[in-house]
Image (spheres, helix red, strand yellow):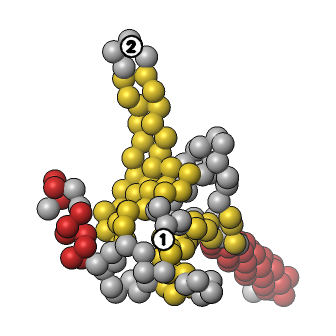
Amino acid sequence: MKWWQKLESWEIAMRKIVGVTFAASVLVCLVIGSLFLLNKSENPTNKFLLPNDYAGWVEVTFDQVDSASLKHEGNTIIFKVPPSGKINTSNTNVTGPMRFYYVDEKGTQKEIPTNVEMIHGVSTTSGTIGKADGKSEDIKEKLSFYVGTKEQWDQVRPSKER
């Protein structure tokens, strides 16, 4: 084999190495970029601030034109639950993990532990009601759940769930 043939073989090998290295670099950049975008578009956390020792139904009605919007803290939506348990908001419902906190009179938040069964009957409802005159009425989306011990839940839950 002559020296120029060896040089051509070496050049071909180097081109392959450079091509594979470039392709691997592009692939790594695509994977890292995808992971970044996936984490960036993560659904927000829904944080519910409940009056201290609250037990009862919570009902959030969305898309209420004359109601205030919910506060955002970073990627968290704040639901400040009044003693009535009812919230009306102009926001639309955005699914995401739910976290629950009791808030005392000083504003101190204490998270309800996930290993203690205190949140029951989580559901969303919406739809349309047909009327006798042929017209229909849209029912705005509602999120509802019960906060309380299992014993309290057993006393108030709808009979079809018992």
Q: Is residue 104 visible?
A: yes
Task: Specify the label residue 67 is tagged with.
Answer: none
Name which residue lies at 42% across and 81% down: 53
Q: Nearer the viewer, residue 82 or 91?
A: 82
Q: Residues within 10 Å of mark 1 (few under 14, many from 20)?
A: few
Residue 4 sits in which quadrant?
A: bottom right
Name which residue lies at 16% across and 53% down: 160
Q: Amino acid at mark 1?
A: Met
Q: Residues within 10 Å of mark 2 (few under 14, many from 20)?
A: few
Q: Secondary structure at mark 2?
A: loop
- Residue at the outermost top position: 133
Position of residue 153 measured from the top left corner of the image (x, y, whole percent): 25, 69
- In the image, residue 118 sits, relative to residue 59, either above or below, namely below
The residue pinned by badge 1 equals 98
Say left or right for 143 vs 116. right
- In the image, residue 158 sits, relative to residue 113, either above or below, namely above
